Amino acid sequence: MTDIDLTNCDREPIHIPGKIQEHGFLIAISKELKITYCSENIITYTDVAAVTLLGTPVCFLETVILKKVGGFIEKLINIAQVNEGFRPVNPYPVMIGDREFNLVISDSDEQYLLEFEPFASDLDLDLQQVIGSSLSEILANANLSRLLDNTAAQIKNVIRYDRVMVYQFHDDGHGEVVAEAKNEDLAPWLGLHYPASDIPQQARELYKHNLVRLIADVAGIPSAILTYTELNDVPLDLTNSTLRAVSPIHIQYLKNMGVASSFSVSLIHQGELRGLVACHNYTPRFIHYKQREAAKLIGQVLSSALSFRQQEEDQHKNNRLKNAVDDLTRHLLRYNNMEEALFKHEVTLLDAVDAEGAVLAYDNHFYHAGKTPDDNFLTGFSSWLQDNMQEALYATDRLPQEYPRAFLIKDVACGVLVCRLSKELKEYLIWFRPEIAVNVTWAGNPEKAVVVGENGLSQISPRESFETWTQQVKLTAASWKSEDFRSALQLKEEVAFAISRKGTEIRILNDKLKEAYDELDAFSYTISHDLKNPLTTIKGYSQLLKRNLKLDTRDARMLDGILAGANRMQAMIEEVLHYSRSGQIKAKLRFVDMTRLLADLKEQLIIAHEHLPLTIAIGDTPPIYGDETMIQQVFSNLLGNAVKYSSKTGAPMVTVIGEHLEDQVRYRVSDNGIGVKLKDLEKIFDLFTRSDEVDAYEGSGVGLAIVKKIMEKHQGHIWVESEPGLGATFHISFQTALKEIA
């Protein structure tokens, strides 16, 4: 084995140590049944040197050492050859001299391993009786804590080690003692945590292959494995070996704890290492193969029981989340409104995943359920996701480490699970979990100690102190589970389908609206043309009658009423036609000189109302980006209305002021006229809508509807503030940068 230092500790080749433990010996044979490797300590057990055996056929071992008829080992190997692989029926009892041994056969690449262990054990028990009662005790209680405690107690009862611990691995790889059975004179280790580095990844892989592992004597001197010259550069793979030597790092680790012998049983769940039953003895202790297999059986029963419980728990959670997603899917089919479907019923977006808060970022809005960040945080977080979220799903239980702004709201958003609906539109399904601050008690400082060796290089040193060391773990939320991911992705598909369906429905509706709009436009032109002709006739005959006939006062007044009505009807037709055309005209965008435009309008209004003491005050006039003709129409309507509805005040006063605000230009047009009642403010921009107070003023109720339509076309906004008798102020805001408008 090479020196292990900081650069290669996690890559230590522990499956090819080149040595075995001293309590047995090993022989490897090739597929041709020729002895290719042999442990040096074989001479201790057989009085035959390893070099004597190397290169000889296996029959020499059978006849000279085992005193068996030739072909014995070949038959055992043939029996182990099955369709599923190599399955020997271990152990095989053999005699070497006057001592009993267990022969354990396994395979190793192109070799077969023959390992010989003493049959004699430090344990003397009726295994069949003990195992039967132990399994009954383990399965007697459905409570998880009791199940673990029973397992530790029963394995201790089988192998009689000083301390037996059930050791559970957490998601980050570190371990925790969750159950313990020990001698009364030993300090408890229950609840202690051990860093992941105590059991490196390559060791965990071996624990998955070998479900039991015995280190009989920590202080034992390992025996080298010898081979002949041709195989010197081919190390023997001892992955499946029961005698495999132990890493010197781990040996020192056990010595530092005062442990003289250790034994472990792997706990496997769905092919992965879930934990260990770790056993410590403070004097050397050897237990033979069958006794280890008995402990392994108990471990397998525990693994099965834990797997069943986990599957039961997972299935319960799956069913709960699936029912929530099914309910939300039905809501999505029934309601077109996303907020209504996902937030307005008993089952909401929050129920689709185990979380404390849920947010839908959709259509430039944030919809909330449970404990969530405010919209200001979500706006920045959505932009961060747009730049940093590489896959369709993103999850972390340590958001403040990746997005520092989350540190300020760690009690709400320490963990996050995000499903992307649209990267370009920054639309997401988001679930939040709060910080869970916990105190973790470690068996010593979890950081590996670094020492400087005699060669001056830094080397890993196993921890020498195991005094309890408490650490407060912060900025971490509960980990997301596969059931959460599965449910979130399923709901994401349903929401995406609903959005797509809604988009299709909107496109169909838009096509129908366009068709109806075109028909209405054609109808408007037709009606205006057809109505103009009879109105022209009515006006013409009325004017002839008035000019050619001598009428009394009553008849003349009636004829004047006919002419006035015809004129109003003709003006209304012109305005309706103009309203219809305002949605059809293609905008020509450019910066409009508002100083000139407002000056022209002011001059026209002063001339048109020269009989009034009219004052029009114009303040700052920042340019507006838009269609000049449409903008002129907006201000012509607003200023004209301001003059009209303040004309009876005695001294009409109209004020126009503009200002530049970040990404918009805002104007306000004020007057000192009759004002608008509160109940009329919301409907003042509706077509043909006029309040009762303006009956004495000419008008059709079309002008402000045209203004609103033009503002919408410019992606702008218009609103009014007013009190009756105190005038009105109309506010209009234009974007400084516009997308192309029709």
Image (cartoon, rainbow, N blue to C red):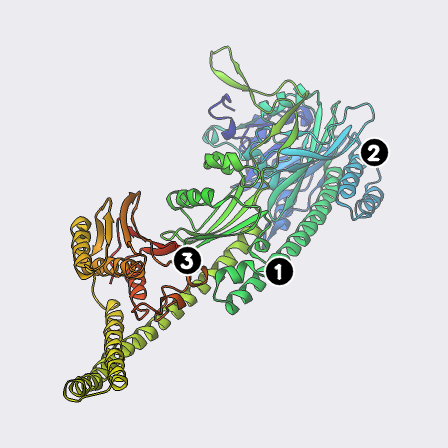
Cβ atoms at labels 1 and 3 below 8 Å apart: no
- Residue to which mark 3 is pinned: 724
Callout 2 secondary element: loop
The kind of residue tagged 2 is Asp
Depth-wise, is mark 1 or mark 3 nearer the camera?
3
Q: CA distance from mark 2 to mark 1?
A: 63 Å
408 is higher (above) or lower (below) than 675 = above
Q: Amino acid at mark 1?
A: Glu
Dot 2: few (<14), some (14–19), or many (≥20) neighbours within 10 Å? Answer: few
Residue 88 vs residue 56, the one in the foreground: 88
Percent coordinates x, y for residue 129 in the rendering: 85, 44
Place residue 447 in its image quadrant: top right
The residue labelled by disc 2 is: 124
Secondary structure state at the residue bearing disc 3: loop
Task: Using a 10 Å C-alpha cutoff, classify the residue at mark 3 as few (fewer than 14 neighbours), some (14 to 19) or many (20 or more).
Answer: few
Question: In this figure, which residue is indicated by the disc labeled 1?
Answer: 346
* 699 horizontally vs 726: left or right: left
User: x, y percentage for residue 45?
Assistant: 69, 27
Q: Horizontal and vertical percent for residue 379? A: 43, 45
In terms of sequence position, does the residue under pointer 2 or pointer 1 come before the other?
Answer: 2
Q: Is residue 177 above or below residue 355?
A: above
Q: Nearer the viewer, mark 2 or mark 1?
A: 1
Q: Earlier in the sequence, mark 3 or mark 2?
A: 2
Marks 1 and 3, the one that precedes in the sequence: 1
